[in-house]
Amino acid sequence: KAGVTQTPRYLIKTRGQQVTLSCSPISGHRSVSWYQQTPGQGLQFLFEYFSETQRNKGNFPGRFSGRQFSNSRSEMNVSTLELGDSALYLCASSLLNEQYFGPGTRLTVT
Amino acid sequence: AQSVTQLDSQVPVFEEAPVELRCNYSSSVSVYLFWYVQYPNQGLQLLLKYLSGSTLVKGINGFEAEFNKSQTSFHLRKPSVHISDTAEYFCAVTLNQAGTALIFGKGTTLSVSS
């Protein structure tokens, strides 16, 4: 079975731009979560989607948003990028209280 | 609110030695506990989890952890480490039995040398 895939793997954007990251979960998994990983703040939970509905939300500003499609694929969007948004963004799909993480998208904001 | 403290940021150890990575959590209600491992340039992989039942939990790659409610701890142990265990280890907690919406500790870098 294929694992969680994330595209793109690397991205460079300029401050003020917006960005969309994509995540394809493992087949059959209906929950998709997003996390931000930075050297300073570590791993932080952004939000979780289940059956196209946001089920849980972390403590991030409204510039961070997401959605989930009927095939469980998910996207997250960051508008008005700031330098501090530079991070590894990890997506995870889950089944039966286990999360399976993708390799992440490395976003660099210049 | 829940929080997780990993007491050691770095743990150096020689191959075949035992290791313990310490994790304490803070919560006023029952939580579910997890340990994940992250190898360089990869995502996270679940090592083990505690949801309920036996307080001694066995995971993959020979790791185990013990849930101690009175001390609010969930320390990870391995009796004999290998070079390939070199990685970053994260302890995580959630109120969600589905194992999502995880609150992570800052991580512990385990360095195994020969």
Image (cartoon, coloured by chain):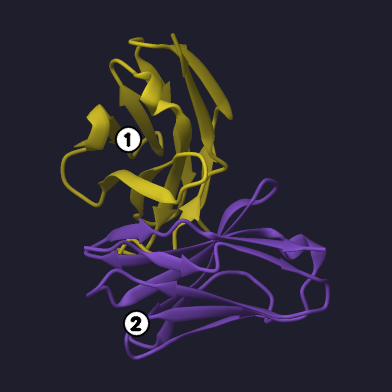
Chain colours: A purple, B yellow
Residue B72 position in % (x across, y down) = 41, 39
Q: Residue at x 51, y 59 (%)?
A: A104
Q: Which residue is mark 2?
A: A72
Which mark is on residue A26? none
Frontmost residue, A54 versus A93 = A93
Q: Residue at x 47, y 67 (%)?
A: A6
Q: Secondary structure at mark 1?
A: strand
Residues at badges 2 and 1 in contact (C-beta under 8 Å)? no
Q: Residue at x 38, y 26 (%)?
A: B84
Q: Disc count in the image?
A: 2
Q: Residue A32 is drawn in which quadrant? A: bottom left
Query: Is the N terminus of chain A in the top left, top right, bottom left or bottom right quadrant?
Result: bottom left
Which mark is on residue B68? 1
| C-alpha separation, residue under disc 2 versus residue under disc 1 | 37 Å
Frontmost residue, A96 versus A25 = A25
Vertical comparison of B109 with A55: above or below: above
Amino acid under label 2?
Ser
Evaluate whether residue A108 shows in this view: yes
Q: Residue furthest left?
A: B53
Q: Residue at x 43, y 49 (%)?
A: B92
Query: Is the C terminus of chain A in the top left, top right, bottom left or bottom right quadrant?
Result: bottom right
Frontmost residue, B110 versus B54 = B110
Residue B1 position in % (x across, y down) = 53, 59
Amino acid under label 1?
Asn
Vertical comparison of B102 with A93: above or below: above
Q: Is residue B97 left or right of residue B102?
A: left
Q: Is residue A9 left or right of residue B45?
A: right
Q: Secondary structure at mark 2?
A: loop
Indicate the chain on which mark 2 is placed.
A
Evaluate whether residue B56 shows in this view: no
